[in-house]
Amino acid sequence: MAHDCVIVGAGPAGMAAALTLADHGVRPLVLDRAARPGGQIYRAASASPLPDRSVLGADYAAGAELITAYTASGADHRAEADVWHVGADGKILFSTDGGTCQAEAREILLCPGALERPMPIPGWTLPGVMTAGAAQVMLKSDAVVAEGAVFAGSGPLLYLIVAQYLRLGVKVAALVDTTPRDNYLRAAPLLAGALRVPSMLTKGLSLLHEIRQAGIPVFRWASDLQVLGQDRARGLRFVTPKGAQEIAADTVFLHHGVTPNPNMTRALGVQHDWNPDQLCWHVRRDPFGQSTLAHVSVAGDGGAIVGAEGAQCEGRLAALNMLCRLGRIDRATRDHLARADLTRLKRLAGVRRFIDRLYRPQAALRVPQCPDTLVCRCEERSLGDLRAGFDAGARDPNALKSLTRCGMGPCQGRQCGPIVSQLLADWRDEPVSEVGYYRLRSPQRLLSLQELSRFNRVHPAPEEAQ
Amino acid sequence: MNADVLIIGGGIQGCATAYHLARAGASVILLEKDYIARHASGVNAGGVRLLGRDMAEVPLSRAAIQMWQELDDTLQGDTGFRPTGLINIAVDQADLDKLHARQNLMQAAGYTHEHIIDRDELLARLPHVNPACVGGVRSDLDGHAIPYKATNAFRLAAERHGARVLDSCELHALRRVGTRWLADSTAGRIEAATMVNCAGAWADRIALMIGDNVPLSHAAPMLMITARMPQFAGPVVGAVSRQFSFKQFENGTVLIGGGAKGFADRANNATRLDYAKLAEAARTTVEFFPIMARAAINRMWAGLEAYMPDNLPVIGPAVNAERAFHAFGFSAHGFQMGPVVGQVMADLVLTGRTDFDLTPFRIDRYDRKVL
């Protein structure tokens, strides 16, 4: 028997959607990979291993409240339920307890969240090089930090983790900021739009102020980054207007923005559009998050980068639309209840445009510049290997994958996909939108033959089944 | 654009045909609506199998297996071919009886490339096989290749000999005007003296354009591949009577096939997978090779393949048009025959004859009188 609604992912978008559904008497099945709800941003917010959670900031604490409300909402939450297939036929397959489960849904809400944009500088695959997001995961889940690390890149998440480290008294070797000078000029005209949500700007400015006050070395306008070291990271070399610099460090955290995690929506086959402002693919959706498959909606950063607050707005809007489609509320009610969130999203979009322009990553950091820099970490394919494949006639991402194995590894192209599309666009001298992306398939994670062979179905409780 | 020969379809049959024709000096244009090896030729299991062929196919397949042994040198390319041998496993006496019956048939026809093996030899060659299996049959010239690479190697070799291969170029219309074929395509008008239909799952539509009807169907055989595992199986492995087949590549990944079908959506150029059937394939695999229980599946996919009702291809001249030839409908076992089919098609186009008996592959073999 089918569920009215299945939500994939219990981050801010998924939790907010579940709360709205519960308000109208629909009990969703929520499948979440993690041990506890919260997503990446509120990871472990309800059970932090840190003695003082406040070092992570007020936003993180607010996440704990959302988790509490969500937990009380009565949603059928399945922890460690790792979804590896969502089909256009409404069937969802996930791994749990060493087997495979199949659920069926009238309405599906996907909240797959964001990925960090790869930063394929020389040495980016050396042990000791991680992303700022990884630093956050270690901190939130296990209260683990790296002493004396160098942080390089640009964007709010990078500054946030540096500030969190400093609050905890962890030594930071340096912040190497790659935001180009030019970005400030180009973002300036968008400032007025951002000022419609002053709190967001204040938050950002106070982070930067905090870092400056701490007195750690901050290098601005950095370019030509290269991780030093043979067998593992030993430091970072880069160039600033003052000349070449080298910082010794055993850990290098890289970050220059996030993009929607495309694997689930791509494998499902809904339409995507290239967004030249965020330099990533967006899921094509209506204002309620409904994708080109009517019974599948997408909310939060997995559709387009909107941030945690925007994700909650989108989650609620998607829930209202699904309630309408399920016949629980009429269209007028939906539109009435949606007004506040639609307005808020419009305001947040103004801030987003400003942030996107200000922290637009350097082109030279988005694709490798040296022939021996790896593009595909899983299959160890370098820029030179890909160029050879292109010269042998593979002009399409899928043809290149077939020829070189780039993107065939367990990450399913999460790392190399955006790089490959950009490289082919450069080589073909066409826009990325013309080049397209890997044709992806399920499973979205590795699963063992044994897991697959133990095939079960999950049904809603009898009183809910229609 | 003008050419001696217009080939429709950039799979291995089309690319091999282009290669053999161009090498013989013909001017060739090949139209491919997606990109080379997009469907069956690029996403198949890569098996290069002579073992267990239909008797009608054995002569072609034997010639092809010889060509595969030297194909990298011939094409000056990399097909990824590895002559690992192939073993089909017998699980019981009924399977063995089947093998012996075939052995008699093969010997009567003078073929000696299939060798029945007993349980001891099976366990020696495949130490991780379920010990309940009773024997099998092997062929030592068989092996596997990388489908996309092999097809692309033919394409590149054809281009070196002057063939023009047009990607993302669809055939909209085709008609005979006087002594020429006139094609409307994405790339504009093309004129050619001869046309060759190698359009795979779309070949019935091309055949229809020139007046040949054919009962072609299509399906989507599914495959899955694991992450790297320690080496445990050298030869390609199949089963005499079960839907089961796999091969382990040099990099340790294991490709699991067996013939379970997904959903073929030809109108949308796409396939969907049937996960319940893949679960069944997973069970069978673990049953035959318990070591595979913990193997991690990395990717699953399916490709669109063309099938004839008797699972034999169409190879030969058109019946309702002059200077037109077909090679399609290989029914999920055409990859291995690609090299020789290219040769046969080139011979037909250039000389009108071939050394092989193509009677079983006639396009009109299903034509019958109205009752």
Image: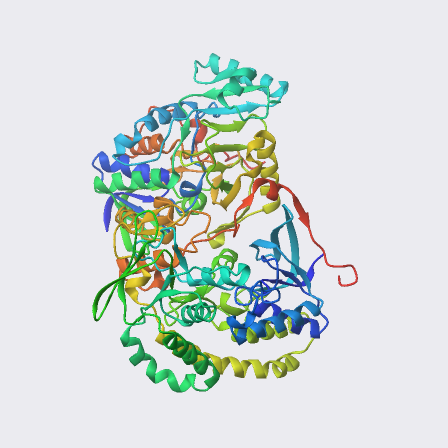
Name the quadrant of the N terminus of chain A: bottom right
Any part of residue B220 in sight:
no
Describe residue A77's horizontal placement relative to residue A345 as left or right: right
Q: Quadrant of residue B343?
A: top left
Q: Position of residue A340 (x, y in %)?
A: 58, 83
Task: Judge left or right: residue A3 versus residue B112.
Answer: right
Q: In which quarter of the image is the C terminus of chain A?
A: bottom right
- Frontmost residue, A151 versus B308: A151
Q: A188 above or below B326?
A: below
A32 or A280: nearer the eye?
Answer: A32
The spot of residue B246 in percent (x, y) is: 50, 33
Question: Which residue is situated farthest in the right direction here?
Answer: A463
Residue A461 falls left or right of residue B362:
right
In this rendered view, identify the residue nearer to me: B14 or A331: A331
Judge by depth and name the residue closer to the eye, A465 or A303.
A303
Q: Residue visible at 47% across and 22% down?
A: B55
Quadrant of residue B22 in the image? top left
Residue A310 at x, y percent in the picture? 52, 75
- Expressed as whole percent of the image width and height from the top left, the position of residue A267 reads 50, 55
* In the image: residue A346, left or right of residue A459: left
Q: How is the image coloured?
A: rainbow
Number of disc labels: 0
Question: Can residue A335 be spotted in the picture?
Answer: yes
Q: In this view, does A163 lie above or below B6?
A: below
